[in-house]
Image (spheres, rainbow, N blue to C red):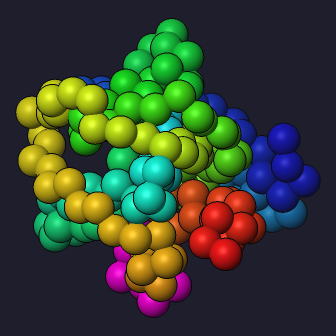
Amino acid sequence: MNQHWKLLSEKDGLQHHFLNTHYQRYEKVATKDELDILVVSSSDAANVIPLTEDLEVILVKQFRFGIQKETLEIPGGLIEFGEDRLVGIQRELAEETGYTGDNWTQLGTLPFNPVYHKNYIHHYIAENVQLTQETNLDLGEEIEIIKMPLPKVLHKVKGGQLAHPHTISAFMLAFDRLQTLIK
């Protein structure tokens, strides 16, 4: 596993909706000290940078319970058990915004939050998306859809005004591609 830490045991803890907790006990190899850690898991997540034909980004403004504030971010969500990642993020985009499209590219996969979370987030870009249907929001979602020109979005990412970590990581993975689109 790791030259510095040895996993001694793990047992499942509480489960709440989509989130599972796990109690882990580690040994620090150099000192033999033991440490209890709480980690969480869920299914993997995915998000998408949806671009219209006119190079507008479809963003979602929504309340985030953890920080008790609204954030402006790209659409995304959890992939359902057994669901293909691409199908899952296409579903999430349609449910949250009503936009769909056929030109999808995977940008990459990163740890969700390796400090305390076991799972991963898969980043995509969808080009030439169009509004084709009504939204279908989950109970915990109240979303305002914001269309914004790509250069303005990049400026907001750089300035810290789009501060959701998964939105930032998606734009960083797509940076070179997006630069070629706005030139």
Predominant SS along the magenta part:
loop
Q: In percent of the image, x 80 and y 64: which residue is there?
A: 31
Q: In percent of the image, x 86 and y 63: which residue is there?
A: 30
Q: In percent of the image, x 36 and y 47: which residue is there?
A: 75
Q: In percent of the image, x 43 and y 41: which residue is there?
A: 129
Q: How many marks?
A: 0
159 displayed left or right of 169 = left
Residue 25 can be seen, yes or no: no
Picture coordinates of residue 167, whole percent (x, y): 47, 61
In the rendered view, would you say 155 is above or below 128? below
The image quarter in which residue 12 lies? top left
Q: Residue furthest top?
A: 82
In the rendered view, would you say 124 is above or below 18? below
118 displayed left or right of 19 = right
Quadrant position of the C terminus in the picture: bottom right
Residue 153 can be seen, yes or no: yes
183 displayed left or right of 150 = right
Picture coordinates of residue 82, whole percent (x, y): 51, 10
Picture coordinates of residue 154, whole percent (x, y): 50, 77
The image quarter in which residue 7 lies? top right
Residues 183 and 10: in front is 183
Q: Residue furthest right?
A: 3
167 displayed left or right of 174 = left
- 48 magenta-colored: no
Picture coordinates of residue 162, whole percent (x, y): 38, 74
Magenta residue span: 157-164
Residues 162 and 69: in front is 162
Residues 32 and 104: in front is 104
Quadrant position of the N terminus in the picture: top right
